[in-house]
Amino acid sequence: MLLQHYRISKRRLAFLIVVIISLTWSLVLYSRSILTSHQLPWYIHSHDPFTSNSTTYAWTTHNQSLDDMIDFAEREMRAALTDDYDERIPGSGLTRRDQVTSFRSLVACWTQQGSWQKRPGTPLPHFQDPLYGQCDRRWRHSDTARPAPLYHWQPQCALLSDTIQQKQWCDIVDRRHTLVVGDLVQYQLHDLLLDALRDGPTICYGELNCKEHTLCPRPKRSRLRYIRNDLLSKTSRVDLAHGAPAANVIEWPFLARHPLETFKIVLLNRSPVVDDDISFVQQLVIALAEIRRIQPDALILYRSSFVGHPYCDEAKGPLLDSHPRQQSKDWKSRLPFGWSEYGRRNRLAQAIVEAAGGVYLDMATSLDQRPDGHVGGKDCLRYCMPGPLDSMALLLYNVFLALGAPSLSVE
């Protein structure tokens, strides 16, 4: 009698089975939708989303709007200077306000308005760090060429020159030495300049403080040096920490008369490490004010910070607006390591640099669209050479053409 009491009819059993199957499929589809919403545009395989702690930092603890922070950054920089740079860019041939305004608008068009186009061409020969040789080795047994160097950045505004003319570039920087300061990504610009302006390799042991190299064929008239200082800090000595120095953030001294007084061209980038907006602004203001104090006529160029691309080995080419995941335009908010805040920090840096009479180079707009072409593996921040950075070399050359040489060059 007890068994008969708990016996389920066939109709009720079938209904319960349908309910269980429906709930199971709903959970599966929901899980897939959650996972898909965290997929980045270049992913081929599904990957777990990054934790909120990977993307949420105390960058905006003061909770001020970006416009307010830009105004604050510009005021801080102007207050730290003894001169006004609205009507000139030191170290260039631009000496009138209208020239400076036109130049900045042209550079913004070159760097911020354009797209990656696939077209044949000869890549920039790479002679420097052998690290990037592994990029070509992966394609050694392939019937096709490595695809990354086949894409070129095509600005909407016409460039002054579609090819790099080494002699003309060397004429502009003649008798002026160049100092490159920043993190390991900035070290790639050191190699890029050597590739563009030299006909052979140089020797550089390590990526901390590379000694000076001759930059152009004319002996000893233009030299290049790299110093690693991730924060562009005013530190006067390396903290050895009793023989166990930290390696996550490197601050090699550079803001002093030696070595700074030797260099008339300074190419900078400050790593957006974990700190708040106020600290970022104040440290960058201190660095540029000190450069202007020691080298008031130096040409200062600042490279924007571009994001890395997790699981970059899965990328097959540049991001295109036609890609369904790219159309959402919010994929950067899902990036780890605080990369989602790079756009904000770049805007602050631009306000500071231009107030100091420097040149802001927006490389992020174009390179953020290149998840392909990275060194790969665990290094999805630096790019293979030749590769996407070739287009940045051409842009940099055109920037120097537009700036021109100063009327008086100092030895």
Image (spheres, rainbow, N blue to C red):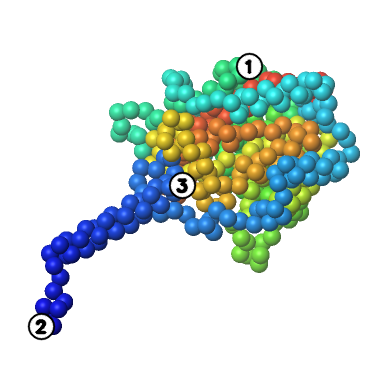
Q: Tell me the residue at 54%/35% (across/down).
A: 367
- Tag 3 or tag 1, which sits nearer the N-term? 1
Q: CA–CA distance between discs 1 and 3?
A: 35 Å
Q: Could you tell me residue 325's position as x and y percent?
A: 43, 39
Q: Is residue 363 visible?
A: yes
Q: Is residue 202 visible?
A: no
Q: Could you tell me residue 297's position as x and y percent?
A: 82, 32
Q: Residues within 10 Å of mark 2 (few under 14, many from 20)?
A: few
Q: In the visual, does 271 lie left or right of 154?
A: right
- Report which residue position mark 2 lands on: 1
Residue type at the position of mark 2:
Met
Q: In the visual, does 200 lie left or right of 301?
A: left
Q: Tell me the residue at 62%/61% (across/down).
A: 245
- Tag 2 or tag 3, which sits nearer the N-term? 2
Tag count in the figure?
3
- Tag 1 or tag 2, which sits nearer the N-term? 2
Q: Quadrant of residue 373?
A: top left
**Between tags 3 and 2, which lies in front?**
2
- Report which residue position mark 3 lands on: 310
- Report which residue position mark 1 lands on: 160
Q: In the visual, does 326 lie left or right of 60?
A: left
Q: CA–CA distance between discs 2 and 1?
A: 96 Å
Residues 288 and 209: in front is: 288
Q: Circle 2 sits in a helix, a strand or a loop, which is it?
A: loop
